[in-house]
Amino acid sequence: MLQQGGNRERDVEFELVFMEYKKMIHHLIHKYNIQDPQGEFFQEGLIALWNAYQRYGDRDSFGKMAYITIRSRLIDLIRKKNRRAEKETATDLISESAYTDESINTFDPFFWERIQNALTDKQWIFVRRKIIEGRAYKDIAALENTTVDAVKGWGKEVKKKLKTLLEEES
């Protein structure tokens, strides 16, 4: 936690600041209903506290600045995690490689039947062409006589439905 080769007196001062402000980090984690079993958010809050201390430690407004800095960093981490989760696609869940029509049924026919029943015809076309056959958006649009944007729209809807469907399974 302490910097090697840093100002020892400043490090000892930070230890006191940490003891005083760690409750603030826990408060913000609780306030935003963050589940933090690995302590990742607490660690981010601690780093933010250190940064605030380095920058504003000698000011009367340190408490406010520490609160704002910690809160901002926690919110940034939440947003980062949400963006990462949104970018996950059905292809990540299955595999990057394409499957043949024969291998799709040997994979798990009940799984694919359940997926197909949950989707519209256009959405199933997206799953079949993109995920199973591994085709590009442009190729799918040409095959289906539509636009690339339309195909991407089908994909977004598929992602939403698959996410809900897979969450129900767990």
Image: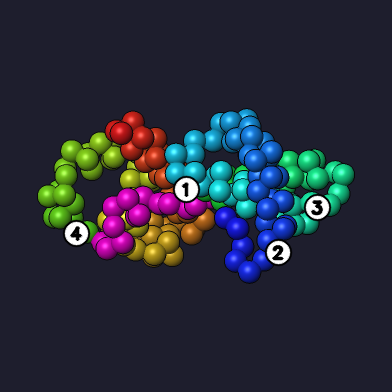
Q: Nearer the viewer, residue 170 or 149?
A: 170
Residue 99 picture location, percent across and down: 22, 59
Q: Reply yes or no: does residue 143 show up in magenta.
A: no
Q: Secondary structure at mark 1?
A: helix
Please tell me which residue is depicted at 51% across the width and 47% down the height of the picture. Answer: 40
Q: Secondary structure at mark 2?
A: loop
Q: Reply yes or no: does residue 87 show up in magenta.
A: yes
Please tell me which residue is depicted at 69% across the width and 38% down the height of the picture. Answer: 20
| Residue range of the region highlighted in magenta in the rendering | 82-98
Say which residue label 2 marks.
Answer: 7
Q: Amino acid at mark 3?
A: Tyr
* Quadrant, the C terminus: top left
Tag 2 or tag 1, which sits nearer the N-term? 2
Say which residue label 3 marks.
Answer: 56
- Within 10 Å of disc 1 (Cα), the crowding (few <14, some 14-19, many 20+) is few
Q: Picture quarter containing residue 63?
A: top right
* Quadrant, the N terminus: bottom right
Please tell me which residue is depicted at 33% across the width and 45% down the height of the picture. Answer: 124
Tag 2 or tag 3, which sits nearer the N-term? 2
Say which residue label 4 marks.
Answer: 100
Q: Nearer the viewer, mark 4 or mark 3?
A: 3
Please tell me which residue is depicted at 39% across the width and 64% down the height of the picture. Answer: 136
Q: How many marks?
A: 4
The residues tagged by marks 1 and 3 sit, at their Cα atoms, a distance apart of 34 Å
Q: Is residue 72 visible from the viewing direction of this image? A: no
| Residue 164 vertical position relative to residue 144 in the rendered view, above or below | above
Say which residue label 1 marks.
Answer: 85
Q: Nearer the viewer, mark 1 or mark 3?
A: 3
Residue 129 picture location, percent across and down: 32, 56
Q: Are marks 4 and 3 in contact (CB under 8 Å)?
A: no
